[in-house]
Amino acid sequence: SALRGYSPPAAAPRREQLPTTKMFVQRMLKDPAFAAKVKEQQLIAASKGQNADPNVIDEATAQRYLDEDEAAQKREKTEVKPMSQKEAESLERVDNRAEQVKVVAQSLAFVGLGVRAVAAGMLGATNDPEVARDVCTIIRQAHKPEETRVGEAFREGEMIDVETVEAMLGDVSIRWVAVEAASGRGVEQDGARLGVAAFSVAGNRCDVRFLCVRPTYHGLYVGHRLLER
């Protein structure tokens, strides 16, 4: 028999639980990315005849979507995603070349070389004897892989000699442009040549003889800027 005068203790107030479907609807409204993923899965299910109306979500399916998304978010926080090909190539171009990046991250100077540029009075134009040796070095360095005889490499011996460069610099039919680092920024000498281009123009045709960039600056858009110039 019940104890006389005894009253059972009051039950603790129950914490209100949001129904799964209500939580699901709130997530759909507040998280566009989640809503897009769910909609995609709904359409796939509907196309397979699993659900005639892709807009109908039952309690169990709503919970599954919530659980799957929560698990996916946890994985994203712990997994290391592999780099895309584009990211890898971009990193490779600048990896361990912070100094070179510092040099090219400025307005580069474009100057004429050779007798034609000097005669035309181009700003900074020069035909100093040292120019031929420097230009020859840049061309040789840029074409060095062709001497390896590996893969498609085919060249035997040096690409060019100083005498040939001197003759080309003295040919008024050939135009020379060099790209220079106005400020060496403690990495290069001020005014260091990073690349050179030689071309000739006949009527509407332009023949590019050389477009060469020092190997340490390959992949840093120096050649691209020189070509645009």
Image (cartoon, rainbow, N blue to C red):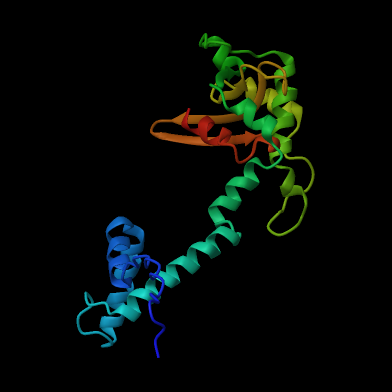
How many numbered discs, if any?
0
Relative to 50, is 107 on the left or the right?
right
Residue 18 locus on image (x, y percent): 32, 67
Residue 81 in sight here: no
**Residue displayed at 44% across by 72% down:** 68
**Residue displayed at 56% across by 19% down:** 109
**Residue displayed at 58% across by 11% down:** 124
**Residue displayed at 31% across by 64% down:** 35
Quarter of the image for residue 8 reads bottom left
Query: Among all residues in the image, which is located at the extreme right?
Result: 157
Q: Nearer the viewer, residue 37 or 198?
A: 37
Residue 45 locus on image (x, y percent): 30, 81
Q: Nearer the viewer, residue 98 or 82?
A: 82
Indicate whether 97 appears above or below 114. below
Q: Nearer the viewer, residue 53 or 119?
A: 53
Residue 82 locus on image (x, y percent): 59, 60
Location of the N terminus by quadrant is bottom left
Residue 30 in sight here: yes
Query: Among all residues in the image, which is located at the extreme front?
Result: 4
Residue 173 locus on image (x, y percent): 53, 24
Q: Nearer the viewer, residue 148 or 225?
A: 225
Indicate whether 44 appears above or below 190. below
Relative to 31, is 81 on the left or the right?
right
Indicate whether 164 appears above or below 116. below
Query: Among all residues in the image, which is located at the extreme bottom?
Result: 1
